Amino acid sequence: MTLAELLWIVVLAFTPGLELRAAIPYAILVAGWSPLAGGTAGILANIALAPVLWFCFDQFMAVVLRVPALARLWEWASARSVRKLDPVVKKYGVYGLAIFIGVPLPGTGVVSACIAAWVLRFRFRDFLLSSALGCVIAGAIVTAVVASGSEAFRFMYKAVEP
């Protein structure tokens, strides 16, 4: 466990579209961390992304919406997030957003949820709670899949001792 590896985990967890789906496999498969350490680091890094996004989002959007091409991309992304989330959030509230974050599929995660929470006018504490719950759910799923996948093929090779 080196500081450089931890930094890469944080960078991957903060990267839109990758987040936990890349940070945890990197930690376990590339850096060689235990599933507990890799999963925990990825989850905590992804949870840390939520308040950073929330507090930077207004300033970021003020800049983005001034550029016509980015404004069109924003319209598409926000409409997509709201279309996917609105029925779930109306029915389940904070837990609906947590479930959205917790399903480790492309297009779901803290970044997409921040867009939807901003458009749906979530309060900060509700978004933070949803993000923390969703990151734990997604992190547990990704860690379990990576840990079982990396061990599932161990029978196919034999360690040779020198």
Image (tube, helix red, strand yellow):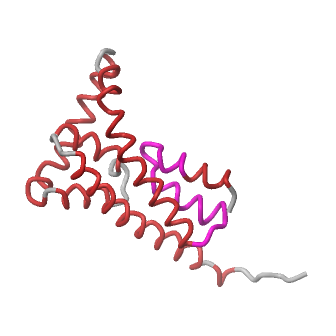
**Is residue 110 covered in magenta?**
no
The quadrant where residue 51 appears: top left
Examine the image and state in which quarter residue 28 appears. bottom right
Residue drawn at x 61%, y 55% is 6
Q: Position of residue 10 (x, y in %)?
A: 53, 50
Magenta span: helix, strand or loop, mainly? helix
Where is residue 73? Give x, y as percent. Answer: 30, 27
Task: Name the spot of residue 115 as percent of width and height, x first.
Answer: 27, 39
Residue located at (37% from left, 65% from top): 136
Q: Is residue 140 above or below residue 118?
A: below
Could you tell me residue 26's position as x and y percent? 59, 58
| In-image side of 15 versus 32 (left or right) | left
The magenta segment is 10-34
Compared to residue 150, the image places residue 25 above or below, namely above
Residue visible at 67% across and 53% down in the picture: 3
Residue furthest to the front:
125
Instruction: Name the residue located 28 percent from the left edge and 47 percent from the top edge.
Output: 113
Front residue (pair 58, 80): 58
From the viewer's perspective, is 134 left or right of 144? left
Residue 20 forms part of the magenta stretch: yes
In the orientation shown, which residue stands out farthest toward the left?
Answer: 91
